[in-house]
Image (cartoon, rainbow, N blue to C red):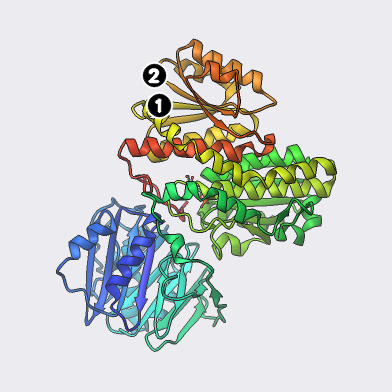
Amino acid sequence: MCGIVAYIGEKEAYPLLIKGLKRLEYRGYDSAGVALLNGDVNVYKKKGKVQELVNHAQGAKKNGTLGIGHTRWATHGAPDDLNAHPHVSGDGRLALVHNGIIENYALLKKALEKEGHVFHSETDTEVLVHLIEEIQNRDNLPLEEAIRIALTRVVGAYAIVVLDKNDPNKLVAARKASPLVIGIGENEFFLASDATPIIEHTKKVIYLNDEEIAVVRRSGSYDIRTINNEVQAPFIHELDMKIEMLEKGGYDYFMLKEIHEQPTTISDCMRGRLNADEGWIMLGGLEEHVNRITKAKRIIIAACGTSWHAGLIAEYLIEDLARLPVEVEYASELRYRNPIITEDDVVIAISQSGETADTLAALELAKEKGALIYGIVNVVGSSIARITDAGSYIHAGPEIGVASTKAFTGQVTLLTMMALSLAHKRGTISTSYFQQLLNEMSNIPKKVEKVLESNKKIEYIAQEIKDKPNALYLGRGYNFPIALEGALKLKEISYIHAEGYPAAEMKHGPIALIDEEMPVIVIATNKSAYDKIASNIQEVKARKGLVIAVVTEGDEVISQIADYTIEIPDTEEPFTPLLSVIPLQLLSYHIALMRDCNVDQPRNLAKSVTVE
Ligand code: F6R
């Protein structure tokens, strides 16, 4: 949520900042801005996408080898030119970009107004730059010291980068609960919300920790202190990311590319962890804490959005196969109620970005209560990955489309392996069934490839739905979370209202909505509840609903009743979600495209939700 990029070195900063902002645009795209230091501080800001900023700054003075940039997802104040970052101090000396929320900004603002500060925006960020200015000028302090003192007075979350006109040889950055990465080049530094703008310049990075302040200098030196002024010895990481992963690679949209990458990303997730020929599964994070996890009284899963849907599938998987009780919680609810969590529990956080504020906070709460905390994360080095006791990366590579696709199947793949491993270790499934499941699991990538071949047919079906105002998604058992996920994908990128429901619950309310205008997408592949789902479809047809059914290859019954069917290959029931979600991703994609929606950057959304 909000993207920050900054540069200090020998090169012209502006083109680097713009390229970086375009890479970070998936984090927020309400407005964008840059500040460049070249004797003066030149600030350019514009409502809308980064390209609007580029058009706006055309012909203006943009030289300078030090600069900061920002792409915004609005929290405080409308998305307009005035509220766009960077924000500048009253004396014009400091410029600051910020990701996060300053919760006590109203109180601080009142106090600063009494001191004569005048504000031009509605943002919490402008208050922060004035607070730093006030402290700096009062005692004539170096920038980093003024920032340090200011941050001790701030309540909330922040990643900030600040430049000082009077000190053109350094940038100062700080973070708390919002990510910030420092890229170390040859006599140059890059600062960014994630590694994507950095990767083409250097592979050496430092992930700033909470309540750390970094000073990076043109001379190539840097230092990091805590907010309590303790010197830190940072660890330099080597990035393992290729630049092609950040390109569309011939596809029109990142979302389409990422949908098509799934055979590979699922394989990558299993690589070195599952070997059907030798009959084993090995998840490093799980093995490290094997006793505690296999003997846990309960597993609690905390996540948001699509990751929460992956968690629901894990509940079915782990209870069904490993016979361990599982509870799945919205992280935002878990953190604010008074949950019973004990040392005998294992709390698993699922997060693509590894930065979701609510998920992070839920984990911190679980940690305080003594539970073992386990992260299932995509972004390497992210906050969740770093605070957990153990964890597993899903290795899906950067996911740029705001709607999650390959990260979801990566999460489900990982959780499926976890359930299988726990079941094997706990002896809750027979060795022969374990082996049968391993064999089938290794066929999943090929079967996903097969599902992707239905793309043309799905595009055709999308025509039928594209002008409808509503849609209902139904599923049972393992496919109930897929109904939720299908509905979420449709609403977030095409703005059609959609709901996911357990198929049997339909008659307790939603059936009242069904008429010829209501498309009903039914995931009807379950072997265990096949007849029941067929009856649910009959109930919809009796009320003239339009039925699109996802069925198992060769299905002869439901294909007679439904208006359209999309076939997926047969598989073991616990693995069905990995196949049945694919047509629903493609369906949303095509509908959104037909409605002229921005598939990769849907309105009001951002990829990394670092505010609560
Ligand atoms: C939907 C989507 C969101 C995220 C949610 C959690 O397509 O992407 O619902 O799943 O914001 O994000 P992470 O997984 O990064 O914690």
**What residue is shown with label 2?**
517
In the image, is the residue at mark 1 within 8 Å of ligand 1 by its beta carbon? Answer: no
The three-letter amino acid code for the residue at tag 2 is Glu
Query: Which quarter of the rendered picture does the N terminus lie within?
Result: bottom left
Q: Kindly indicate whether the residue at mark 1 contacts the one at mark 2 (C-beta within 8 angstroms).
A: yes
Question: Which of the 4 image quadrants contains residue 166?
Answer: bottom left
Q: Position of residue 221 (x, y in %)?
A: 44, 87
Quick check: can you spot residue 155?
A: no
Which mark identifies residue 470?
1
* Extreme residue toward the left, this view: 59
Which mark identifies residue 74?
none
Camera-side residue: 242 or 426? 242
Say which residue appears at 32% left-offset and 35% top-offset: 595
Say which residue appears at 44% left-offset and 27% top-offset: 471
Quick check: can you spot residue 612?
A: yes
Left or right of 213 on screen, residue 266: right
The three-letter amino acid code for the residue at tag 1 is Asn
Q: From what the image shows, is residue 395 above or below residue 131?
A: above
Q: Position of residue 326 (x, y in %)?
A: 70, 41
In primary-sequence order, the first of circles 2 and 1 is 1
